[in-house]
Amino acid sequence: MSGKFELKRSPNGEFHFHLLADSGHTILSSETYKARASAQNGIESVRKNSVEDHRFERKTSTSGRPYFVLKARNGEIIGQSQMFSTAEQMEEGITQVKRDAPAASVSDLSH
């Protein structure tokens, strides 16, 4: 079982990616990048950092909903989850990223 990264171009010409579960649901979204190569480096950073639990920061939104961010070694956020209803669902999302990201294929839809 493995997820898939989708690399896309925003209407403003910048690039971003999502990590999709087998179900097609987005489990992690990136910030935007000015260059395709930078977004591709972001994908590689997710692959490397997702295997280390301490890179996941568990957070709570202002509306009280749990979510997580994945940080690189330098402390920069490289991806953020959706908002979850429960902390248990958030932990399941983290488990899914840890499992899927390292071997996920990349679909470049940015052309």
Image (cartoon, rainbow, N blue to C red):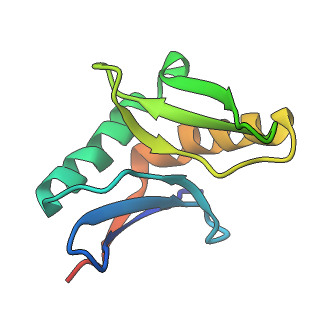
- Residue 42 lies left or right of residue 17; in this view the side is left
* Residue at horizontal 48 percent and vertical 33 percent from the top: 70
* Residue at horizontal 74 percent and vertical 34 percent from the top: 91
* Residue at horizontal 43 percent and vertical 55 percent from the top: 104
Q: Quadrant of the C terminus?
A: bottom left
Task: Give percent across and percent down for residue 66.
Answer: 75, 37
Task: Give percent across and percent down for residue 76.
Answer: 33, 28
- Residue 99 lies left or right of residue 78; in this view the side is right
Quarter of the rendering containing residue 86: top right
* Residue at horizontal 56 percent and vertical 43 percent from the top: 97
Task: Give percent across and percent down for residue 4.
Answer: 46, 63
Q: In this view, does 21 lie above or below 65?
A: below
Can you name the residue that lies furthest to the front here? 62
- Residue 111 lies left or right of residue 64; in this view the side is left
Can you name the residue that lies furthest to the top here? 54
Pick the residue in front: 50 or 37. Answer: 37
Pick the residue in front: 38 or 108. Answer: 38
Task: Give percent across and percent down for residue 48.
Answer: 34, 32
Quarter of the rendering containing residue 77: top left
